[in-house]
Image (tube, rainbow, N blue to C red):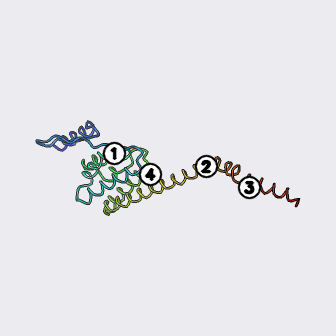
Amino acid sequence: MSVAAMLLAVALLLGAPSSRLRLTAGRSASPRPEAPEPNDPLAFASSLDVFAACLQSGMAVSAAASATVPTAPPALVAVLGRAADLLALGSDPSTAWSTPTEVDRHVDALLRLARRSAASGTALAQGITELAERSRDEAADAARAAGERASVLIAGPLGLCYLPAFLCLGIVPVVAGLAGDVLRSGIV
């Protein structure tokens, strides 16, 4: 019986589409919410907030990861979906949260946090909340740096246009007027 259950679980894992819509008795499934923009710097943090809220409400880690998948950015969907499926099948948490492919540093930090939490027994929700805050702070710093770079880049053309006009219309007439007065007075 357990071999049949394992084969059924493997078949479901391999044959199931990545976006899972579940039908409940008497109701149709709601449509999948819009996926965030792939380059949205705050999408990762908001997905972590959803994950942490699910964990803090008492959901199992696999159920919380599955609940986070529909609104997660593409880089996080594969990792959370894989971990949720493996944890639901009873896999070891260190295996479920292992790095399957090359991932960005934010996803790698989440995977390390989840493995550490599984090994030590610390609360995963608190660490995920802190990771979301750190991700939000990094996005704010990046936006601030981009704004500062833009102000520097704007100052170049402004200087190229404004300074010659200032010299031609402001400084040259004053110097010419003073030079004319000095030459007429006979001081030189």
* Residue wearing tag 3: 174
Left or right: residue 79 versus residue 171 is left
Of the numbered discs 1 and 2, the one sitting upstream in the chain is 1
| Badge 3 vs badge 4, beta-carbon distance below 8 Å | no
Give the labeled residue for mark 4: 105
Closer to the chain start, of discs 3 and 4, is: 4
Q: Which residue is mark 1?
A: 77
User: Disc 4 or 2, which lies upstream in sequence?
Assistant: 4
- Where is residue 185? Give x, y as percent: 85, 59
Amino acid on which the number 4 mark rests in the picture: Arg
Of the numbered discs 3 and 1, the one sitting upstream in the chain is: 1
Mark 2: few/some/many CA within 10 Å (<14, 14-19, 20+): few
Q: Residues within 10 Å of mark 4 (few under 14, many from 20)?
A: few
Q: Which mark is residue 163?
A: none
Q: Which amino acid, by three-letter code, is at mark 2?
A: Leu
Q: Earlier in the sequence, mark 1 or mark 4?
A: 1
Residue 137: image quadrant is bottom left
Residue at image mark 2: 158
Q: CA distance from mark 1 to mark 4?
A: 15 Å
Mark 3 against mark 2, which lies toward the viewer?
3
* Element type at mark 4: helix
Q: In the image, 179: left or right of 19? A: right
Real-space Cα separation, disc 1 to disc 2, in angstroms: 45 Å
Q: CA distance from mark 3 to mark 2?
A: 23 Å
Q: What is the secondary structure assignment of the residue under circle 3?
A: helix
The extreme left residue here reads 26
Q: Quadrant of the C terminus?
A: bottom right
Q: Quadrant of the N terminus?
A: top left
- Binning the other alpha carbons within 10 Å of mark 3 as few (below 14), some (14 to 19) or many (20 upward) gives few
How many angstroms separate mark 4 from mark 2 (CA)?
Answer: 38 Å
Count of numbered circles on the image: 4
**Mark 3: amino acid:** Val
